[in-house]
Image (cartoon, coloured by chain):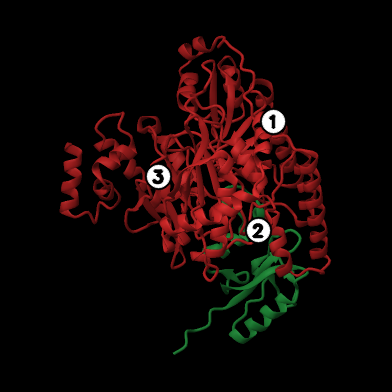
Amino acid sequence: MYAYSDFDRDFLAERNAQFRAQVERRIDGALTEDEFKPLRLMNGLYLQLHAYMLRVAIPYGTLSGGQMRQLAMIADRWDKGYGHFTTRQNIQYNWPALRDVPDMLDALGEVGMHAIQTSGNTIRNVTADHFAGAAAEEVADPRPVAELIRQWSTDHPEFQFLPRKFKVAVTGSAQDRAVTAAHDIGLRLVLRDSQLGATVLVGGGLGRTPMIGKVLTDFVALPDLLPYLEAVVAVYNLLGRRDNKYKARIKITVHENGIDEIRRLVDAEFVPRRAAFNGADMALYTKIAADFAAPDFITGTGDFAAHYADDPIFRSFIDTNVAPHRHPDYAILTVSLKAHGATPGDASSDQMRLLAELAETYAHDELRISHEQNVILPHLPKRHLRTVFDALSDAGLGTANIGLASDIIACPGMDYCALATARSIPVAQEIAVRFEELKLEHEVGPLKIKISGCINACGHHHVGHIGILGLDRAGVENYQITLGGDGGPDAVIGERAGPGFAYDEVVDAIERLVRAYLDIRENAQETFLDTYKRTGAAPFKAALYPETASPRTNQQADKAHAA
Amino acid sequence: MPRPFTPKVVTANALLEGDVIYLTTQGHWTRNHNEADLIEDPATAEIRLLEAQALAHEAVGPYLADATPGKDGPEPIHFREAFRTRGPSNYVHGKQEP
């Protein structure tokens, strides 16, 4: 993992001291709220529905046991004993008092963490594949590139007042677990003639106007990457619209100007930018990459095979929550923060401490946070899986549901967020409980349900196989459903199914969708998404709106069923 | 014909804790919606909002929210404002805390 240098520590300490003084000036009245607001946002402090909220960056989702332990301490000392892991690999504290925030930031600084650029019209926390450095099929570990981008973008003087926020994601795997196509810039690391570089996607994003990113260039060699990114952001900084915040993201800039014109401008901008880079970035990259060297893997799997053969509950957990590791004697274990009925993404301080202890004791002191709001032990020897499973189960973290119907992404929605138009969390909780009661989700198989409480789409509903969008319709919560979205390498925006559902109708609607899928799938191997691609929306719409389904729609449904 | 005026309360978030507050008839802030001043005409509403904005050392982002008379005082109309009187639905936090 990246280790903070003296420069990093000094920078953070100075920045925190500045913010401490700004808070004091706000409290004593020397600063108005209009003056203070941009300052607090630069340091990740929002004012939400019921309280302040501090958003802390977990760069590319990687943290150590010690860092997780500190997050738990902060939750206990200055919040309500829990934290909420978000869809951008951050953690949010929902209840800090204004006076305490500088102390919280100092405590974060003690373990090399901060909340800088987790808000505002800046380059936000750089996200990455949560299996980085561990996935069996990976081309390259994306974290050194992500760390290089983090250092380049943090406090970058040219990019502190962009037209809108700017999000970058990096993947080193063709499976694209980082949803790169839904980011302002998505980087997909590739090897060309043994040289590491990246395919650069630009103009992706969800929100009010969802768009899939377009390929700006299919290969930028690593030494050219930072100047190329700088050229992209510089072009956007000048060309992006500042007259209308709803048209200010780079996806609109790309849409209005065309990808060819953006490419021409970026290529022109790249030339002087490249000349200004003297190689210091690559020297830094080499140093950073060394920090991300793989741990010394131990060999042997102990009693794993026997436990797997003998215990069906353990076997189900392994089959559901473990992904292949690059080393045959290791596992990538995803710990679900989606126990049925729990708040998606929330972890208590006790759970955080347990995860820290398990990482430190058994898993090379590494943890990851996924954009799907779970925690990963990326380097767990198979020989320790049984012990870890038992400890997790005792702490309410042994749910075997990764990738299943109850592994739902949900934004905080109107339970916390000042922007939300409807609640997300209780809908997610009720769907998860429903599928647990039905004992259906393992039979259903892979299914991504994603819920957003407003059009800004923090819950990624557009790329959910089933997406749910909570809206305010004439003073009543109403939920639109989208179908067929996909956040993978061939990302697709889901299609709106039809009229929305009232709060007390939406869980039944989701159950009807899933039952329709079970009814019409060709076999158990055909996933929900595959079935949707084969049949189209008609049979699913017929299930959602049985009372309004036309004879033609019913015929299509019957035909799909017969097929 | 102009639409009838919907009564309002002035609400904001407290500067130090961030929790939801309401302006009383005495010009103080209260945590309880039913202790808020229910404003029955638009001119008074604008004046009271200006008064609230002048209390910037105590409150952040004051605005007018629709409300209706209730048995124990003003009650919120919109579900967002109803949530603000209580706290989140997933934990007994905020104003619901014992």
Residue drawn at point x = 44 percent, y = 34 percent: A174
Distance from disc 1 to disc 2, alpha carbons, whole Å, reads 35 Å
Locate residue B31, reporting x and y percent. Answer: 70, 64
**Mark earlier in primary sequence (1, 2):** 1
What tint does the image give chain B?
green
Q: Position of residue B71 (x, y in %)?
A: 59, 70
On-image quarter of the C terminus of chain A: top left
- Percent coordinates x, y for residue A282 in the rendering: 64, 38
Q: Are marks 3 and 1 on the same chain?
A: yes
Which circle, 2 or 3, is nearer the viewer? 2
Is the residue marked by circle 1 packed among few (<14), some (14-19), or many (20+) residues within 10 Å? many
The one nearer the camera, A187 or B36, is A187
The mark found on residue A65 in the picture is 1
In the rendered image, what is the letter of the chain coloured red? A
Asked which secondary structure carries label 2, the reply is: helix
A401 lies left or right of A521:
right
Circle 2 residue: A158
The residue pinned by badge 3 equals A491
Please report whichever mark, 3 or 1, sits nearer to the chain's N-terminal start.
1
Give the letter of the chain under mark 2: A
Mark 2 and mark 3 on one chain: yes
Task: Name the amino acid type tagged 3.
Answer: Ala
Badge 2: residue crowd in 10 Å (few <14, some 14–19, many ≥20): few
Q: Nearer the viewer, mark 1 or mark 2?
A: 2
Q: Quadrant of residue A379?
A: top right
Amino acid tagged 1: Gly
Crowd tier of the residue under label 3, counting other residues whose Cα lies within 10 Å: few below 14, some 14–19, many 20 or above: some
- Do the numbered discs 1 and 2 sit on residues whose CB atoms are within 8 Å? no
Q: Along the polypeptide, which appears first: circle 2 or circle 3?
A: 2
> Residue A426 bears which disc, if any?
none
